[in-house]
Amino acid sequence: MCKQSKIDSLVVLLQAALNENSQRELSNLNLQEVYKTSQQQEVIAIALDGLQKLSVTSPKLLQLDAAIKTIKMQWIGSLMVQEKRYHANYNAAKELSDFYDKNDICTYILKGFSISKLYPIPSHRFSCDLDCFLLTKSNKNNAYDLGNSLVSSKGGKVNTDYYKHSVFAYKGLNVENHRFCCSIKRSKRTKELECYLEDLLQNSIPQFINDTTLALPPQMFQALFLIEHANGHFLYSRMTIKHICDWAMMRKAFKDTLDWNEFNKQCKRFGLKNFVDCLNRLTDYILGKCNYQDLLPIDKRVLNDTFKEECLSTGMMKQRIEKAMGVVRSSWKFKHFCGDSMIKELSHSIWAYLTEDNPELD
């Protein structure tokens, strides 16, 4: 199955799952290949939702021989594991935020549950941890240190080696308690974006997820943070189709409530405008609002890069060298989608890592 066929097949399934008006059909399907691709792209449950819908309208799509039945049962098994993990993580996050709430801390959800609630079936959006940003309720000061010490006081082991966030486990949930929302060592641009995002949080009235004390950031924060997060993955590691689906669901949910003129203004200010324009076109493609032929050449290049398979070595040092070489080979990404050139951003980042053990906002 060629790469384009893999992309087309998975996109049709995603359209069926996420766009209730999708009219596209599949004449044939290599179930094993699409199952594997959906795993790699972190959309295994959403793709299965699409497959179930298409199976109703196109009953001949799946000829249920023994091999097909085996793959479909594996797929359903993976879905059940994900749903179980989602609900366990949700309950643990709810309990943790209640604990923080009793200690004068508001727990803002940076992604994960705040995005999954935008999907038709929240538990089908893959997420393996909790990214949070803590502010004191009384004066809205950064509660990063207080949050860490409270977990430590309950016997939790908190790792604070990384400047951006601490890491700890709570009732089986992996938690990243963010000191900063952005990778501020990357560039002056990301540090300025950090200041803007924290200001949005400190001047907002929190809205909560259902009956929990898990707080939702304001919509402008959510949109900018999602784009910056996806941009970081795209430039430095790997963006998956899940990031594109996240943006598709957020655009749809915030269509009439977000100040899009202000959002585009801030994207331009922080060097994200070209990236968000590309994602807008890709989300239109994912939702079936345009065809593959309607995409620009740069959009197709981004899509192909998203579906690129990585085969890293087993050794940690070799993996780091390979990832570094991958960044160098991706200079075209910086040229089109970053506020700074690759040389400037990498130079700034390397210097910051060498000279700033504990960076602060100016």
Image (cartoon, rainbow, N blue to C red):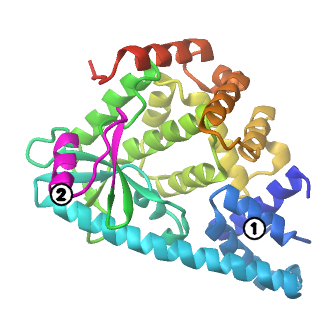
Q: Earlier in the sequence, mark 1 or mark 2?
A: 1
Q: Residue at x 10, y 41 (%)?
A: 139
Q: How many marks?
A: 2
Task: Give the extent of the magenta segment.
Answer: 144-168
The residue to which callout 2 is attached is 100
The residue to which callout 1 is attached is 35
Q: Position of residue 179 (x, y in %)?
A: 29, 37
Q: Is residue 163 within the magenta segment?
A: yes
Residue 51 occupies quadrant: bottom right
Depicted 325 relative to depicted 37: above or below:
above
Drawn side of residue 71 relative to residue 197, left or right? right
Nearest the viewer among 52 and 105 is 105
Q: Is residue 225 within the magenta segment?
A: no
Instruction: Judge whether residue 64 can be spotted in this image.
Output: no
Q: Residue at x 56, y 50 (%)?
A: 247
Name which residue type carries label 1.
Tyr
Drawn side of residue 144 relative to residue 89, left or right? left
As measured in the structure, the alpha-carbon distance from the residue carrying label 1 to the one carrying label 2 is 40 Å
Name which residue type carries label 2.
Tyr
Nearest the viewer among 201 and 314 is 314
Drawn side of residue 288 relative to residue 109, left or right? right
